[in-house]
Amino acid sequence: MSAKVSMLAPMVDLVHPRFSLSAPPRSFAALMDLYEMNYLYMRRLVPDGRCVAARDVSVARDGVALHLRVLDRSPYTTTFSLTHRFVRPGGEGEESLPDLAVRVYHDARSAEAFHPPGDLAGREESDLGRRWAANRFLNRWLRFCLGAGHGFGPPAGPPGGTPTVIPT
């Protein structure tokens, strides 16, 4: 086990208690718990979603950029687009994978993915199943992004500092 993984596991356990829920997986109650965990991870990734720039890029230790775009702001919600952008083979443009829209409900302290990646969109037959799959994917991806060192903080400080967020 690498040092990164061994350091990340205790931090994840503090926020994500291995789904020790009384509600069965894929139930409505478990989905609501998943929304709450997604909110906690989004708050770690974007500590102040109400003040973050309309477009930001976070570059992690491994060099893979995470792109954030604010799609909508209202007093009680903020909707983001989160994606990685990869150059297509042959250099023919970029591809955004995964391309998720995430709505953060500030008052309810929950966050949900509401545009699942294409390969998840048609797998589940029920609405609850689709929401579970999309938000379980978001949960795992947010944990991956946080573990890689991504984050969108306040605007960069005075010159000479090392900014972690690069406005685009």
Image (cartoon, rainbow, N blue to C red):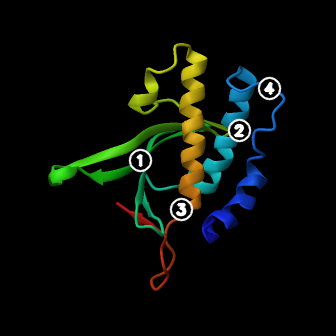
Tell me the distance, in whole angstroms, between the alpha carbons under discs 3 and 1: 14 Å
Image coordinates for residue 63, horizontal then vertical, percent: 40, 67
Say which amino acid is labelled 4.
Ala
The disc placed on residue 112 is none
Furthest residue in direction bottom, as rendered: 160
- Where does residue 134 sit, x and y in percent of width and height? 53, 31
Instruction: Give the residue at mark 4.
Output: 23
Q: Which type of secondary structure does the marked residue at label 2 adopt?
A: helix
Task: Depth check: give the residue in front, 71 or 132.
Answer: 132
At a point 42% along the width and 33% down the height, the residue shown is 117
Residue at image position (60%, 42%) is: 139
> Helix, strand, or loop for circle 3?
loop
Numbered tag placed on residue 148 in the rendering: 3
Amino acid at dot 3: Ala
- Image location of residue 144, percent across then percent down: 55, 53
Does label 4 or label 2 sit earlier along the sequence? Answer: 4
Residue at 54%, 46% in the rendered image: 141
Q: How far apart are marks 4 and 2 (CA)?
A: 14 Å
Residue 36 - label: 2
Residue that label 1 marks: 83
Q: Is label 3 or label 2 in front?
A: 3
Task: From the viewer's perspective, tell me whether residue 81 is left or right of residue 111.
Answer: left
Identify the residue at horizontal 51%, vertical 55% (top origin). Answer: 52
Name the side, left or right, on which 54 lies relative to 18.
left
Q: How far apart are the two marked residues, 1 and 2, measured between alpha carbons?
A: 21 Å
Q: How crowded is mark 4: few (under 14 residues within 10 Å), some or many (20 or more)?
A: few
Camera sees residue 47: no
Quadrant position of residue 149: bottom right
Position of 76 with respect to 30 (left or right) is left
Mark 2 crowdedness (10 Å alpha carbons): few <14, some 14-19, many ≥20: some
Q: Which of the two discs, 3 and 2, labels the residue nearer the N terminus?
A: 2
